[in-house]
Amino acid sequence: MSEFLSRLDFAWPWAWLLIFLPLLGRYFLPQDREVKEHVRVPFLPELIDELKLNSQPVRTSKLSSLIFWLTWILLVAALSRPEYLTPPQHIQKPMRDVVLILDVSGSMGKNDVQGGITRLQAVQESVRKFVAARKTDRIGLVIFASQAWPFAPISEDKQALQTRINQLAPGMIGQQTAIGDALGIGVKLLDTTANKDASKLAILLTDGNDTASQLAPPLAAQLAATHHVQVHTIAFGDLNSTGDDKVDLPLMQDIARITGGKSWTAAGSGAALDSVWQEIDAITPVQVKSIGWSWHIPLFQWPLLLALVLLILLAVTRFVREKTA
């Protein structure tokens, strides 16, 4: 009971001042009205006997007074809007926003990964494991090839993100590689999130070098650093390739260095790629903020209901008293 009372509050506490209003009306307002007009009634004695005007007025009983004051107190209590404050429920709010920036160019369809799977299939498998491990992060997805596209918004909906990861296909938006554009879109996606206090992390994975960007990758890295976005980079695929298929390791290392991130290489092995994602998971601690929420439950209907019951009781007692008088 003491805990309940400690959590009881009134939205309009000043309404309790109205509890003295009947006393003001009784002691400060004039009780008798001054008669300014007179009527001559020749048959006044007969009228007094007929209407019983000379009888003593029925005095208010103590029960009626008690019912009146209880009713008035309940009405004032209802007007003051009593509320019950529920015990706080603690909610874990994610404080890290992550964007996965994945290469889906035509070269990601090469079937040169151990186990007889394509590069993109190996990436999908390892990324799914990473997403499943990061239960408290808000994660989004950007894909790039000849162009860069936001493919999943930053959210806590891991199931929807896993569905989007499963939909990836090599060459789905072209054959070339736009690393700078993809990084720029990832920074913009992180910069437009509602949670401004969260730390921002982008993970860039590619198997080639930049061949199609309108935004130069070094400039995109500077943009990420300006917006406090840390970028980890992963070079995947055959590191001995030549031409456009050869991954630009110096560029990947520069992007990580400029933004305060780290750079990894995982050549032709799903296990090596898994270890990279596991290492990223290990060096990226969980960041959450505990928030306590309480709800105000209105209680005004209960004193209002009791006041209605008492008013009905008062009306019934007056009717019975008048009938028996």
Image: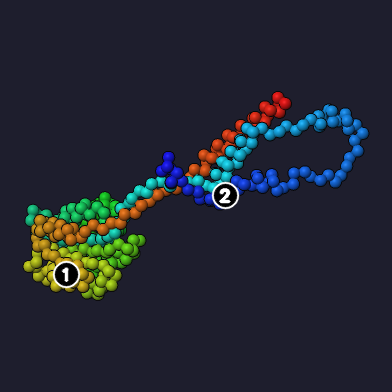
Q: Position of residue 218 (x, y in %)?
A: 22, 74
User: Which residue is pictured at 16% across the width and 64% down the height?
Assistant: 234
Provide the secondary structure element on which disc 1 rests.
Answer: helix
Residue 22: quarter of image? top right
161 sits left or right of 122 in the view:
right
Q: Position of residue 61 (x, y in %)?
A: 66, 32
User: Which residue is pictured at 91% across the width and 38% down the height?
Assistant: 40
Asked whether the viewer can see residue 287, the reply is yes
User: Which residue is pictured at 58% across the width and 36% down the height?
Assistant: 308
Of residues 256 and 322, the one nearer the viewer is 322
Q: Position of residue 183 (x, y in %)?
A: 24, 68
Three-letter amino acid code at disc 1? Met
Three-letter amino acid code at disc 2? Ala
* Mark 1 crowd level (few <14, some 14–19, many ≥20, 10 Å Cα): many
Is there CB contact under 8 Å for labels 2 and 1? Answer: no
Of badges 2 and 1, nearer the viewer stands 2
Chain-order first, disc 2 or disc 1: 2
Calculate the distance from the C-alpha at mark 2 to the C-alpha at mark 1: 68 Å
Provide the secondary structure element on which disc 2 rests.
Answer: helix
User: Which residue is pictured at 71% across the width and 28% down the height?
Assistant: 322
28 sits left or right of 150 in the view:
right
Q: Quadrant of the C terminus?
A: top right
Does 160 appear above or below 4?
A: below
Q: Quadrant of the N terminus?
A: top left
Residue 32: quarter of image? top right
Colour mode of the rendering: rainbow
Residue 219: quarter of image? bottom left
71 sits left or right of 34 in the view:
left
Q: Which mark is residue 252?
A: 1
Does 71 appear above or below 173?
A: above
Name the residue tied to disc 2: 15
